[in-house]
Amino acid sequence: MSKKVLIVSASPRKGGNSDVLCDQFLKGALEAGHQAEKVFLGRHQINYCTGCGVCNQTHCCVQKDDMAGLLEKMITADVIVLATPVYFYSMDGQLKTFIDRTVPRYTEISNKDFYFILAAADTNQKNLARTVEALRGFTEDCLNGAREKGIIYGTGAWQKGEIKDTPAFQEAYLAGKNC
């Protein structure tokens, strides 16, 4: 059964390690016959949430940027991949801003399968637990019916492209193929 897959790449570097893992996931998903799309957040204008609260009543953000369209993609997807480089043991600012801006319609992001892709120079997967917990705080605690399907730990990759020499490279492809 074909699924609609949305891959959110929060890497600030096109072709950075977490972005490369997104490409692998995309490749696997497309080969499996899924309708898949990768969104590179760095190419979109997404402003910070101002906490104005207007969206609590209107379910629409007052800011006019690219987030409304991206939020619609999340709502219509069956599978969502959230990918980030890990900076100081947490997700990067692009992904956090993106998550914060789901507030107007986050209750509509329901019954989705989620994958997390993390890339870090650190070689100890256990040191990424705080990042995973922050992502789970969004998916498990805020979204109705979210199902965590897998985590790809791209550890031990500092320089751009080093991720290709790690097990995560193949893991990302297989996760996409089997999502």
Image: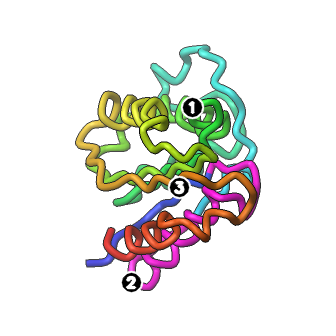
Mark pair 1, 3: CA separation: 13 Å
Q: Secondary structure at mark 2?
A: loop
The residue positioned 56% from the left and 32% from the top of the image is: 90
The part of the chain drawn in magenta is 10-37
Q: Is residue 18 above or below residue 92?
A: below
Q: Amino acid at mark 3?
A: Gly
Q: Tell me which corner region of the image, top left, top right, bottom left or bottom right, holds residue 113.
A: bottom left
Q: Can you identify the residue that label 3 sits on?
A: 154
Q: Pick the quarter of the image with the N terminus.
A: bottom left
The residue positioned 62% from the left and 33% from the top of the image is: 97
Is residue 161 shown left or right of residue 90?
right
Decide whether residue 21 is among the magenta residues: yes
Q: Amino acid at mark 1?
A: Tyr
Q: Tell me which corner region of the image, top left, top right, bottom left or bottom right, holds residue 63.
A: top right
- Could you tell which of marks 2 and 3 lies nearer the N-terminus? 2
The residue positioned 42% from the left and 38% from the top of the image is: 126
Q: Secondary structure at mark 3?
A: strand
Q: Pick the quarter of the image with the C terminus.
A: bottom left
- Could you tell which of marks 1 and 2 lies nearer the N-terminus? 2
Q: Can you identify the residue that label 2 sits on?
A: 33
Q: Position of residue 58 (x, y in %)?
A: 49, 26
